[in-house]
Image: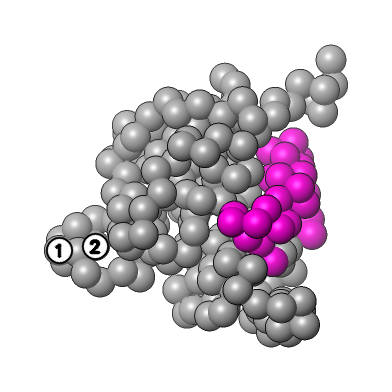
Amino acid sequence: MSVRAAMPSLHSAQFVAGATKLRDLPADQGREIAFTGRSNAGKSSALNRLTGHTGLARVSKTPGRTQQLNVFALDSRHRLVDLPGYGYAKVPETLRQHFAQLLTDYLRSRRSLCGLVLLADIRQGLKQEDQELVRARSDIPILVLLSKADKLGRGAQRMQVTAVARTVPENCYILPFSAHTGEGTDEARARVETFLRDRSAAP
């Protein structure tokens, strides 16, 4: 059976673990895609939309709600990981530092990480922290989802895509996305599945 034929659908995602420390994650083998971005950028909403499960990842209007690494298994070898958001200051400093270190350690050391999905509000573009993150992981493909695209018209969307493209490495694929309307869902889902199949996947 080919790898392509064995690739599970994102619709098969099921919650399997919530980890506050790297050692609490599933064994570091197989392939996994992590969803990352600033707090309230729409990571959980995007994950729910791409998997087709409304309540898979907890969605809140309160920034900083995701306070652990939430792992969703597609099968025994493929996973999605919802990472804590960064850039939100209205949590205790010790907790914010813990999130930052946990995120850094995960991105640096997780061998099964084969791609990233970075969420950023299309109206704001990529902040310094977003740009630092994508440049730090230029060795793996990154899907930049410019979320809340329904807030802008098509022309403004294209301008934002062009502006963001000037600030990121070539390993990034940029796509306007709306979890509310479903815009960009099919293309984003196909891109994530490609990342899970092939470590060398490029935009």
Distance from the alpha carbon under mark 2 to that under mark 1: 6 Å
Residue under label 1, please give it.
92
Q: Nearer the viewer, residue 159 or 61?
A: 61
In the depicted structure, whether residue 108 falls above or below residue 69: below
Q: Is residue 152 left or right of residue 89?
A: right
Which element type, helix, strand or loop, lies under badge 2? Answer: helix
In the displayed orientation, state which residue is furthest to the top.
1
In the depicted structure, whether residue 46 falls above or below residue 137: above
Which element type, helix, strand or loop, lies under badge 1? Answer: loop
Residue 100, visible in the rendered structure: no
Residue 186 spot, x, y in % from top left? 76, 47
Q: Is residue 63 left or right of residue 185?
A: left
- Is 202 within the magenta? yes
The image quadrant of residue 173 is: bottom right
- Is 84 within the magenta? no
Provide the residue span drawn in magenta: 176-203
Q: Is residue 129 left or right of residue 121?
A: left
Residue under label 2, please give it.
96
Dot 1 amino acid type: Pro
Chosen colour scheme = one colour
Residue 175, visible in the rendered structure: yes
Residue 139 spot, x, y in % from top left? 65, 57
- CB of mark 2 within 8 Å of CB of mark 1? yes
Q: Residue at x 29, y 40 (%)?
A: 21
Q: Residue at x 60, y 21 (%)?
A: 75
Q: Residues within 10 Å of mark 1 (few under 14, many from 20)?
A: few
Q: Residue at x 71, y 83 (%)?
A: 156
Q: Nearer the viewer, residue 13 or 195?
A: 13
